[in-house]
Image (spheres, rainbow, N blue to C red):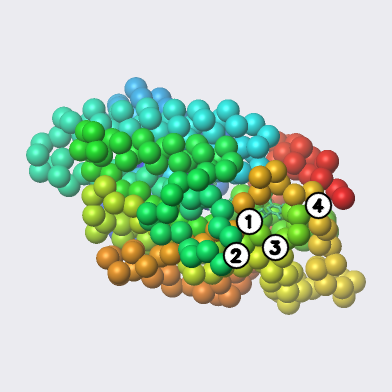
Amino acid sequence: MILVTGSAGFIGSNFVLDWFAQSGESIISLDKLTYAGNLENLASLKNDPRHIFVHGDIGDAQLVGRLLAEHRPRAVVNFAAESHVDRSIHGPEDFIQTNIVGTFHLLEAVRTYWSGLTDTEKTAFRFLHVSTDEVYGSLAKNEPAFSETHRYEPNSPYSASKAASDHLVRAYHHTYGLPVLTTNCSNNYGPYHFPEKLIPLMIVNALAGKALPVYGDGQQIRDWLYVRDHCSAIRRVLEKGRLGEVYNVGGWNEKANLDIVHTVCALLDELRPRMDGKSYRERITFVTDRPGHDRRYAIDARKIERELGWKPVETFETGIRKTVQWYLDNQAWVSNVQSGSYRLWVEKNYAGRAR
Ligand code: NAD
Ligand code: TYD
């Protein structure tokens, strides 16, 4: 079996669901169930004996140690993190606690477990750390995309905390020989994406008749990858990645935020037209920019393609259509995640932003 952390979040839950669609191997899931963790994402596995869910913190080394000793996984895939840049600006402390201190405790528990394995088990074991392209900082318009050797230049408390965790993972390989792998992926989108991030926020706001808040001039560029493609890349790296290596994962889909919002509006105009016959675009509102907003991210995904033969399956056009359709088909999920704490966040982040 494998241990997956952060399995009730956006990418973690997609990874677990996808894993069982491809493999019979069991998963032990560990998640703290923060505001971003949602057991509804894993509801279809409720009575599946291959899946064991444990509510807990990656920073609880005792708990993690016990789970490892009891279940003896052959690999750990670490998704657990605080993941939203805007929240890291309002309150960085949770990011330091989970992304840095939590990853450290997780690594310690894994190192202790790994040290006690037989030589054959030790060689086969993997610790895969899921990270982000944001650790590389921001690119100017004509600069080449981030390769794995790009300098780390994190600009937000979120990306700085992820960068620190990447360094710890690297150090555990170099110092203790822990068999680690790291992936740095671009922006994901798809089902179960929490509606604090750009794409689901725009879909959810549009359907609720609310404003569509675009930060600054909307010309910031992100490189978008459909979440299931990220999951297949992680499986490939787990299976074939060279120990201690870093693999950048991306979809070769650079888009300006405003273009993304226009695409979402066009799909909604087609799939769920407004009663008054107007376009959802009409609700786009330019609001005060994010402090320290990175201008452009772009991933050079040639290494994972060359070494491991991985390529994304979805284009942006196919992926975004599936995503919008998923939100239309899952309105109950949407209304359940918009709890009191979600509304408080929306107030905190957007109230002072109107221009
Ligand atoms: P998410 O915020 O949707 O989910 C994070 C999950 O981790 C939640 O279920 C949460 O409850 C859990 N968690 C938080 N703190 C924890 C702790 N201390 N112990 C155990 N569980 C904890 O995030 P996501 O978008 O699914 O991202 C998953 C990982 O992928 C993160 O490490 C993130 O940095 C990375 N990543 C995300 C993107 C993206 O576009 N979303 C892109 C590249 C990399
Ligand atoms: P986000 O989904 O938060 O991901 P990240 O900051 O990790 O790239 O934001 C994606 C882009 O969309 C980013 O440039 C900020 C912008 N954005 C808006 O313009 N309006 C919004 O309401 C949000 C949440 C994001």
Q: Residues within 10 Å of mark 4 (few under 14, many from 20)?
A: some
Instruction: Give the numbered dot on residue 295.
Output: 1
- Residue 180 appears in the picture as rendered: yes
Mark 3 nearby-residue class (10 Å; few <14, some 14–19, many ≥20) = some
Rendered location of residue 87, percent (x, y):
64, 39
- Secondary structure at badge 1 equals loop
Tell how many labels.
4
* Left or right: 198 as drawn, with respect to 311: right
- Name the residue at 83% across, 72% down: 279
Q: Tell me how far mark 1 sits from mark 2, CA to CA.
A: 8 Å
- Dot 1: within a 10 Å radius of its alpha carbon, few (fewer than 14), some, or many (20 or more) residues? some
Which mark is first along the chain, 2 or 1? Answer: 2
Residue shown at 20%/38% (left/top)? 177
Q: Are marks 3 and 4 in contact (CB under 8 Å)?
A: no
Res 219 label: 3
- Whichever of labels 4 and 2 marks the residue nearer the N terminus, that label is 2
Q: How much space separates mark 3 and mark 4, taking CA atoms?
A: 13 Å
At a point 29% along the width and 51% down the height, the residue shown is 245
Whether disc 4's CB lies below 8 Å from ligand 2 is answered: yes
Callout 1 touching callout 2 (CB < 8 Å): yes
Camera-near label (1 vs 2) is: 2
Residue under label 4: 287
Does the numbered disc 1 mark a residue whose Cβ is under 8 Å from ligand 2?
Answer: no
User: Tag 3, which secondary structure?
Assistant: loop
- What residue sits right under mark 2 in the picture? 141
Front residue of 47 and 87: 87
Which is nearer the eye, 216 or 278? 216
Q: Mark 2 CB in 8 Å range of ligand 2?
A: no
**Tag on residue 161?**
none
